[in-house]
Amino acid sequence: MSDLAPIITVSTDLPRGLVKFAASGLWGEEQVKEGSAKIGLAAAPFVRARKPFSILADYSEAIVAPREATELIRDSFVAARKMGLQRIAVFNAPVLVQMQYKRLADVVAIAFFDSKIDALAWLREAQADADPEHA
């Protein structure tokens, strides 16, 4: 990656109960707040319907965030958990980013994968466990 500017793209996959996002660049406190707000908007349909949801995150071009930003990420995970967040599957994250996010595993179930396919499979397992008829 040649640019350190923080970028996030977010989408909602209603049938799968997913919020998908890709984050790249270096994230400070302000960018984490803005990114969390975008993810919150994408999760709103699940929250309104009181349906559980999971997050599929592509961190292939992410850089380790400063400590203050990591604390804000933790706070956003705690809030999202209260609103129905079940799991976060992260794929293609650099090792240092994985180490940083593993410290947040006490807040929400989070796992790291080398491929999007494996990440989706792990999320589907959770859906099957929660609702075997609709997995």
Image (tube, rainbow, N blue to C red):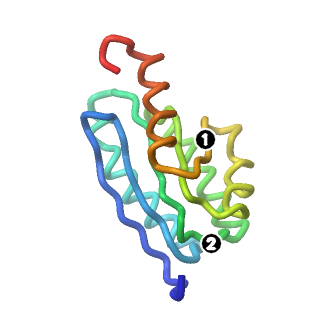
Q: Which mark is residue 13?
A: none
For residue 84, above or below residue 40: above
In-front residue for pair 11/128 = 128
- Badge 1 crowding class, 10 Å Cα cut-off, few under 14, some 14 to 19, many 20 or more, is some
In-front residue for pair 119/10 = 119
For residue 97, above or below residue 133: below
Q: Is residue 64 left or right of residue 45?
A: right
Q: Which mark is residue 110?
A: 1
Task: Look at 31% across and 34% down and name the residue there.
Answer: 16
Disc 2 marks a residue whose amino acid type is: Ile
Per the image, the residue denoted by label 2 is 63
Q: Real-space Cα distance between discs 2 and 1? A: 18 Å
- Badge 2 crowding class, 10 Å Cα cut-off, few under 14, some 14 to 19, many 20 or more, is many
The quarter in which the N terminus is drawn is bottom right
Q: Earlier in the sequence, mark 2 or mark 1?
A: 2
Task: Look at 37% across and 59% down and name the residue there.
Answer: 38
In this view, which residue lies farthest toward the top?
133
In this view, which residue lies farthest toward the bottom?
2
Disc 1 marks a residue whose amino acid type is: Ile
Task: Look at 49% across and 83% down and name the residue there.
Answer: 5
Q: Position of residue 47 (x, y in %)?
A: 34, 35
